[in-house]
């Protein structure tokens, strides 16, 4: 069963780009002692993800963080270089952490994997969650991966009120 309110964030190792190159980030370190908004997308640069989902979080990052959120992160089953290119192309790297779930380790552990033969490999479902000290306090999973309504920044802002 997919991750739900009250569940602990599963342990997984993700990757992000640092000034020194690719760096591993454990979910334990990412979520430990913090309030984190994490949203997952099927793929960097894909139309809905790039034009509809990510921009709202970039635009509203300061407002989201003003509600007590320590970090906003986006996760996709892409490699770290693609995620870094997406961060740069979207001008989002100053407000959002771009995380590569390279082998779908997190997506599978959270039961949020999306089998999408059109992409050629497993991807992440479109989701958004809020976690406090590693415990899920809010989660929404988009029914139609081509939409970003229930998982967008507006839905997160409403959940934070």
Image: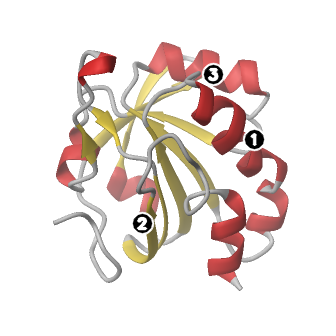
Q: Which residue is mark 2?
A: 32
Q: Nearer the viewer, mark 2 or mark 1?
A: 1
Pointer 3 local density, CA inside 10 Å: few below 14, some 14–19, many at least 20? some
Identify the disc placed on residue 55.
1
Rendered residue at 18%/51% (across/down):
109
Label 2 residue SS: loop
Identify the disc placed on residue 86.
3
Pointer 1 local density, CA inside 10 Å: few below 14, some 14–19, many at least 20? some
The number of discs equals 3
Rendered residue at 83%/59% (across/down):
62
For the residues labelled 2 and 1, the Cα–Cα distance comes to 26 Å
Residues at marks 3 and 2 touching, judged by CB atoms closer than 8 Å: no
N-term mark: 2 or 1: 2
Q: Where residue 83 sits in the image (x, y, percent)?
A: 53, 23
Label 1 residue SS: helix
N-term mark: 3 or 2: 2
Q: Where residue 140 sits in the image (x, y, percent)?
A: 45, 67
**Quick check: 2 left or right of 40?**
left
């Amino acid at each position: 069963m997919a991750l739900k309110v009250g569940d602990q964030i599963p342990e997984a190792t993700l990757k992000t780009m640092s000034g020194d190159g690719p760096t591993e980030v454990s979910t334990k370190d990412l979520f430990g002692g913090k309030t984190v908004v994490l949203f997952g997308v099927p793929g960097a640069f894909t139309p809905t993800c790039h034009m509809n989902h990510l921009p709202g979080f970039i635009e509203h990052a300061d407002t989201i963080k003003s509600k007590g959120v320590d970090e906003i992160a986006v996760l996709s089953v892409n490699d770290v270089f693609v995620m870094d290119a997406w961060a740069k192309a979207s001008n989002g790297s100053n407000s959002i952490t771009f995380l590569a779930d390279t082998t779908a380790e997190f997506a599978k552990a959270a039961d949020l994997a999306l089998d999408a033969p059109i992409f050629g490999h497993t991807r992440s479902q479109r989701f958004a969650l809020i976690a406090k000290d590693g415990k899920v306090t809010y989660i929404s999973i988009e029914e139609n991966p081509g939409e970003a309504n229930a998982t967008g920044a507006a839905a997160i802002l409403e959940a934070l009120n």
